[in-house]
């Protein structure tokens, strides 16, 4: 796919899915309650005013606008990169995943002042911090970019005879 608008449309679909699922969770679950789906997976409703792993969550509120500004700046860069690398499907997929996730969480910050999280992985007394579809998109996109960079390195080394 060489059309960058397809990748931006894919990001839009991810944003819509993320926001739709969050809408259902906000209107179905109550903060503090948990619905066990599997012995290691529960649905919870939490609002994270911070970043990953609740970084800066305890601050006075300035972080809301800081994270919105950072995400919007990064998103503009991601759109530029999608257009610049339009012929590289793997890279565009990764960038579109990150873009959709970043903008999904920006919408939460604008609407609620915090990111809506609802997936909780746990085992006995161990709990991973709650997360959402947007977070998953960002994580998968970042992992794909890392994998792609290693793949490119191998291809380039093979093309130059291992130098």
Image (cartoon, rainbow, N blue to C red):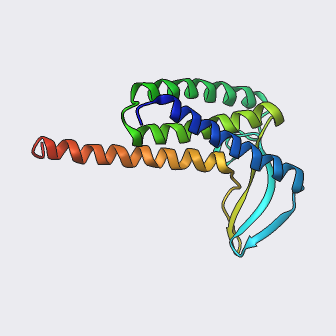
Observer-nearest residue: 30 or 64?
A: 30
Which residue appears at 62% of the width and 25% of the height?
A: 72
Q: In the rendering, at what x and y percent does residue 58 appear?
A: 77, 40
Which residue appears at 12% of the width and 40% of the height?
A: 160
Q: Is residue 3 visible?
A: yes
Observer-nearest residue: 27 or 163?
A: 27
Rendered image quadrant of residue 156: top left
Q: In the rendering, at what x and y percent does residue 79 appear?
A: 52, 26
Relative to 144, does residue 79 appear above or below in the rendering?
above
Quadrant placement of the C terminus: top left
Q: In the rendering, at what x and y percent does residue 25 appear?
A: 82, 53
Q: Is residue 43 left or right of residue 27?
A: left
Q: Is residue 116 visible?
A: no
Q: Is residue 111 left or right of residue 12?
A: right
Which residue appears at 68% of the width and 72% of the height?
A: 40
Relative to 49, does residue 40 appear above or below in the rendering?
below
Rendered image quadrant of residue 8: top right
Q: In the rendering, at what x and y percent does residue 73 appear?
A: 58, 23
Residue at the far left in the pictured view = 161
């Amino acid at each position: 796919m060489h059309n960058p608008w397809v990748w931006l449309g894919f990001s839009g679909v991810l944003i819509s899915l993320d926001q739709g699922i969050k809408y259902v969770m906000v209107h179905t679950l109550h903060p503090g309650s948990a619905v066990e789906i599997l012995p290691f997976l529960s649905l919870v409703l939490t609002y994270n005013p911070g970043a990953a792993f609740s970084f800066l969550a305890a601050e006075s509120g300035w972080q809301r606008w800081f994270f919105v500004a950072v995400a919007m700046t990064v998103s503009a860069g991601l759109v530029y990169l999608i257009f610049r690398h339009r012929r590289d499907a793997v890279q565009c997929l990764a960038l579109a995943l990150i873009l959709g996730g970043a903008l999904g969480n920006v919408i939460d910050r604008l609407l609620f002042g915090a990111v809506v999280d609802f997936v909780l992985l746990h085992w006995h007394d161990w709990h991973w911090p709650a997360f959402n579809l947007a977070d998953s998109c960002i994580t998968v996109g970042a992992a794909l970019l890392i994998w792609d960079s290693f793949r490119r390195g191998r291809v380039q080394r093979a093309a130059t005879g291992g130098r």
